[in-house]
């Protein structure tokens, strides 16, 4: 399935159907991530139920600590 993630066109397997599965695909499921799907923030409680579709635009933002 073709998506745009953080401004980059990517292809993910058709088995990736939800936000949770997308985060697992990119190995980000263990991090605190803010997900925006088609200009709408998706709360963590909704990741498992929120489906993604061909052509969706997704922004993934995670925080990096520093000092």
Image (cartoon, rainbow, N blue to C red):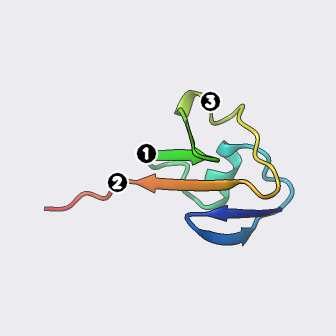
- Whether pointer 3 and pointer 2 mark residues with C-beta atoms closer than 8 Å, the reply is no
Residue 13 image point, x, y percent: 82, 62
In the rendered structure, which disc, 3 or 1, sits on the residue that comes first in sequence?
1
Q: Identify the residue position indicated by label 1 in the image.
A: 32
Q: Position of residue 61 (x, y in %)?
A: 45, 54
- The residue lying at 55 percent from left, 64 percent from top is 6
Contact (Cβ within 8 Å) of mark 1 with mark 2: yes
Give the Cα distance between marks 1 and 2.
Answer: 7 Å
**Mark in the foreground, 3 or 1:** 3
Q: Which residue is mark 2?
A: 63
Figure quadrant of the C terminus: bottom left
State the residue at coordinates (43%, 45%). Answer: 32
SS category of the residue bearing label 3: helix
First in sequence: mark 1 or mark 2? Answer: 1
What residue sits right under mark 3 in the picture? 46
- Residue at point 83%, 62% (across, down): 1
The residue lying furthest to the top in this view is: 45
Q: Is residue 51 left or right of residue 39?
A: right
| Foreground residue among 28 and 2 | 2
Total label count? 3
Q: Going from the N terminus, do you reach mark 3 or mark 2 first?
A: 3
The spot of residue 46 in percent (x, y) is: 62, 30
Q: 10 Å neighbourhood of mark 2: few (<14), some, or many (≥20)?
A: few
Residue 62 lies in quadrant: bottom left
């Amino acid at each position: 399935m073709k998506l745009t993630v953080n401004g980059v066109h990517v292809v993910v397997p058709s088995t990736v159907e939800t936000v949770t599965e997308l985060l697992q695909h990119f190995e980000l499921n263990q991090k605190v991530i803010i997900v925006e799907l088609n200009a709408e923030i998706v709360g963590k409680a909704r990741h498992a139920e929120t489906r993604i579709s061909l052509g969706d635009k997704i922004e993934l933002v995670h925080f990096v600590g520093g000092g």
